Amino acid sequence: MIVAVIGGEAAPPEALLKAEAVGRELAQRGCDLICGGRGGVMEAACRGARSAGGRTIGVLPGSDRGNVNPYVDLPIVTGVGAARNLAVVLSAAAVIAVDGAYGTLSEIAHALQHGRPVVGIGTWSIAAPGTDDVPIVRTEDPREAVTLALALAAAAAAAENRSG
């Protein structure tokens, strides 16, 4: 299973530690990690995954492969800028958002729009008009975030199989 880890390049140290733990936990459970391939949360998550023998995929916004973080195994060079955010979330069965800036917000929106479950660790809180909150499942524990993401992805896949 491929799981996206999203978050900003300028994240506080606590968020980076949690992102690294998320990456490590994903790898320990046999998941591939996909992200935007750059620094901050993305690099920390990739570092964690690689430390546990996992495979990492980085979807880069630019056309220079040299802008990838050193823990990405499979860099994908797009040259499409922030439009790469859609490719990151559509390639994943679930999304784990750690901290984040506006790029993370756009990835959350794409994920929700396309039915990908989102688990958040210290990330955005947004509400659609006329509702209480969007369906971002929240936790502060990296291990629980992975457990939730995998369970939600499995449930979404089962529901799709029943309807399809």
Image (cartoon, grey):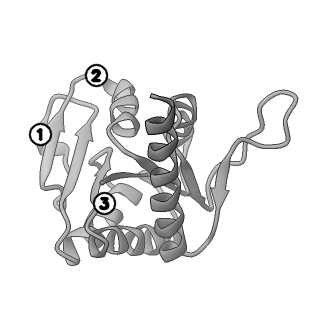
Give me the C-alpha separation between circle 1 and circle 2. 13 Å
Give me the C-alpha separation between circle 2 and circle 3. 20 Å
The residue type indicated by label 1 comes to Arg
Residue at image position (32%, 44%) is: 36
Q: Position of residue 74 (x, y in %)?
A: 13, 48
Residue at image position (29%, 76%) is: 28
Between residues 114 and 81, which one lies in front from this camera angle? 114
The answer to whether one can see residue 69 in this image is no
Residue 4 is tagged as none
- Image quarter of the C terminus: top left
First in sequence: mark 1 or mark 3? 3
Between residues 47 and 63, which one lies in front from this camera angle? 47
Give me the C-alpha separation between circle 1 and circle 3. 15 Å
Say if 8 sits above or below 142 in the image: above
Mark 2 packing: few (<14 Cα in 10 Å), some, or many (20+)? few
Element type where label 3 sits in the image? helix
Residue at image position (34%, 68%) is: 26
Q: Are marks 1 and 3 in contact (CB under 8 Å)?
A: no
Q: Which residue is mark 3?
A: 43
The residue type indicated by label 2 comes to Val
The residue type indicated by label 3 comes to Glu
